[in-house]
């Protein structure tokens, strides 16, 4: 009962945050020079034609009126109609969101598993050559820009070795790709997201485990003669995962923004590519729809982190 009350309290707390995010995004989009009418008309843009299109799209109204109209539609579950795709924003998000979710969730799961392995082995062998060697590799990956890593992987595995496709989700010669083809197209973008995520998570886990090793209950476990593997997994790793759980919840927005760059590099048709195309066309309904969705996912990610926190550490009480 306390957990349900706590969850409802957190959701209610998130409402003002969401309103602030959408309001700020709305203002920023509308103060940027240019607009959808300028993009639509191109070289044929004249003040009269721009004013006519703005009037037909409702963009001639004051910003606060446009925002109130948009938020009232949002409360009815209507995210608006795309200027450039001529479809509802809901249908566009429903089409592209599953692809991005598959990419991001796959990266989270694989990164989490690999980061735990790396963090545990580094903590167990701290200040050894193994620890220093892995640290160098991690810092190298951490410092490498996402787009640069993507270009390197394309150069090696697509152009050099011709093992994997360099972009898209299917071959142009095969309009009905199977599961294997889809997975082959996703390997490189997922690899970039995984390789850029592991360094931060593994470093947090390593530091947390080394700190936990110094606790009195760990010394007691050693004094009782428990096996090293059991101490590492049951007494140290479980408590150290608390910091990693928090980090994963806070990393969700970063993973989605990272997916935006990766989808552009690999021409992967997901939310990131949709956002980039909408930004180029000043397609405000799509931009606001994606910003709202990412805001909701961020809040859900933090809420999930807090709930997992309580599950991993029973001493934490929901109030």
Image (cartoon, rainbow, N blue to C red):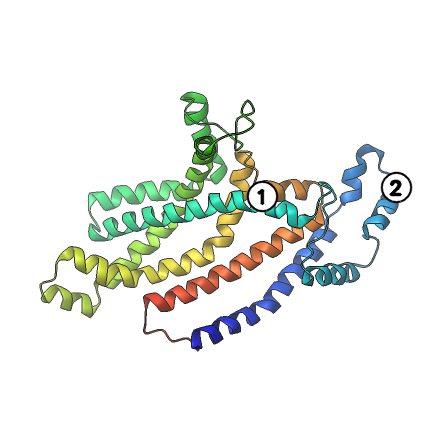
Left-right relation of 310 to 102: left
Q: Nearer the viewer's eye, disc 1 or disc 2?
A: 1
CA gap between label 1 and label 2 equals 32 Å
The mark total stands at 2
Q: Residue at x 25, y 52 (%)?
A: 120
Q: Quadrant of residue 67?
A: bottom right
Left-right relation of 209 to 177: left
Query: Residue 125: where, in percent of width, then height?
Result: 20, 50
Q: Residue at x 37, y 40 (%)?
A: 140
Query: Residue 6: where, in percent of width, then height?
Result: 47, 74
Figure check: 37 above or below 238: above
Given residues 135 and 168, the one toward you in this image is: 168
Figure check: 111 above or below 155: below
Q: On the rendered image, what quadrant is the C terminus found in?
A: bottom left
Q: Residue furthest right?
A: 48
Mark 2 is surrounded, within 10 Å at the Cα level, by few (under 14), some (14 to 19) or many (20 or more) other residues, namely some
Query: Residue 65: where, in percent of width, then height?
Result: 79, 62
Given residues 278 and 213, the one toward you in this image is: 278
Left-right relation of 2 to 45: left
Q: Quadrant of residue 281?
A: top right
Disc 2 designates what residue?
A: 49
Q: Residue at x 59, y 55 (%)?
A: 293
Disc 1 designates what residue?
A: 96
Q: Residue at x 52, y 42 (%)?
A: 99
Ranked by sequence position, the earlier of labels 1 and 2 is: 2
Query: Residue 215: where, in percent of width, then height?
Result: 22, 67
């Amino acid at each position: 009962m306390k957990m349900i009350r706590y969850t409802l309290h957190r959701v209610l707390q998130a409402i003002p945050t969401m309103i602030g995010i959408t309001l700020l995004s709305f203002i920023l989009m509308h103060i940027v020079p240019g607009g959808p009418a300028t993009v639509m008309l191109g070289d044929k843009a004249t003040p009269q034609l721009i004013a006519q299109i703005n009037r037909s799209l409702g963009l001639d109204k004051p910003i606060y009126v446009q925002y109130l109209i948009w938020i009232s539609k949002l409360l009815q579950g209507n995210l608006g109609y795309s200027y450039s795709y001529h479809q509802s924003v809901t249908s566009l998000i429903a089409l592209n969101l599953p692809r991005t979710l598959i990419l991001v969730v796959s990266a989270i799961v694989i990164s989490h598993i690999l980061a735990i392995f790396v963090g545990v082995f580094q903590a167990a062998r701290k200040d050894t050559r193994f620890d220093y060697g892995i640290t160098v590799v991690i810092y190298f990956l951490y410092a490498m820009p996402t787009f640069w890593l993507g270009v390197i992987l394309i150069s090696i595995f697509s152009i050099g070795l011709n093992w994997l496709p360099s972009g898209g989700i299917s071959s142009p010669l095969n309009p009905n790709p199977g599961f294997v083809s889809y997975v082959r197209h996703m390997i490189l973008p997922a690899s970039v997201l995984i390789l850029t995520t592991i360094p931060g998570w593994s470093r947090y886990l390593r530091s947390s485990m080394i700190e936990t090793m110094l606790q009195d209950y760990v010394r007691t476990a050693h004094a009782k003669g428990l096996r090293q593997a059991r101490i590492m997994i049951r007494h140290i790793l479980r408590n150290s995962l608390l910091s990693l759980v928090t980090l994963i919840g806070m990393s969700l927005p970063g993973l989605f923004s990272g997916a935006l760059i990766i989808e552009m590099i690999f021409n992967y048709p997901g939310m990131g590519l949709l956002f980039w195309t909408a930004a180029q066309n000043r397609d405000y309904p799509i931009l606001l729809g994606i910003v709202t969705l990412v805001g909701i996912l961020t809040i859900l990610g933090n809420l999930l982190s807090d709930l997992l926190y309580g599950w991993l550490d029973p001493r934490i009480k929901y109030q």
